[in-house]
Image (spheres, rainbow, N blue to C red):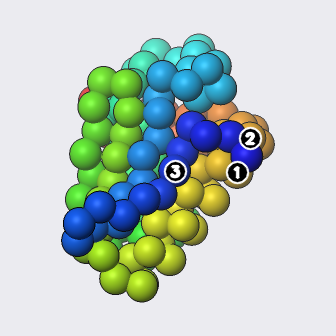
Amino acid sequence: MADYVLVFTYKNNVSLMLQASDGTVMALGEKLGALCPDAYMNGYNWEALLRYYLEKHAPDILEGMDPDPEADMYEAHWPLTPENEAKAKRFEEMIRSLVEHEEELCRLVQEECGEIEWD
């Protein structure tokens, strides 16, 4: 399994981290940027795109989420509960699927670029 996204617990949080600087993620980011000039895929724009995607497909994952993007990564944190651990794992699986089967994100960015609140 690719290690560009992982879920971990620390103190009283469960967290998900996506490495925007990973080669696989960067290659996808370049494709998305070619489809939409605003889609410069740093950690902040991964946050914008993933939030947009979750609002449409899994809004429950956003409940209690505290996003924390940086230039080269995207992190999201939830209070540590069994329910939030399950959310984080679902989100991890969703990201892996979107990255490894990039057609969905490419279609989304191409068709809905103007609807996404890019950084």
In the rendered image, residue 118, in percent from the top left (x then y), is placed at 33, 32
> Residue pushed farthest front?
11
Residue 19 position within the rendered picture, expressed as x and y whole percent measured from the top left: 47, 33
Rendering quarter of residue 29: top right
For label 2, the residue is 100
Residue labelled with disc 1: 97
Could you tell me which residue is drawn at 25 percent across and 45 percent down? 68
- Which residue is at a point 24% across and 59% down the rendered structure image? 66
Query: In whole angstroms, how far apart are the C-alphas of marks 2 and 3?
Result: 15 Å
**Is residue 88 visible in the rendered structure shown here?**
yes
- In the picture of the structure, the residue carrying the numbered disc 3 is 6
Q: For the residue marked with disc 3, what is the amino acid?
A: Leu
Earlier residue among tags 1 and 3: 3
Task: Give the SS element for disc 1.
Answer: helix
Q: Nearer the viewer, residue 90 or 30?
A: 90
Using the image as rendered, state which of residue 114 and residue 41 is in the foreground: 41
Mark 2 is on which residue type?
A: Glu
Q: Give the amino acid type for the residue marked by disc 1 in the picture.
A: Ser
The residues tagged by marks 1 and 3 sit, at their Cα atoms, a distance apart of 13 Å
**In the rendered image, which quarter is residue 38 located in?**
top left
- Mark closer to the chain start, 2 or 3: 3
Classed neighbour count for the residue bearing mark 2: other residues with Cα under 10 Å, few (<14), some (14–19), many (≥20): few
- Residue positioned most to the bottom: 82
Whole-percent x, y for residue 71 in the image: 30, 24
Q: Neighbour class for label 1 at 10 Å: few (<14), some, many (≥20)?
A: few
Image quarter (top left, top right, bottom left or bottom right) of the C terminus: top left
Above or below, comparing residue 59 to residue 26 in the picture: below
In contact (CB < 8 Å): disc 2 and disc 1: yes
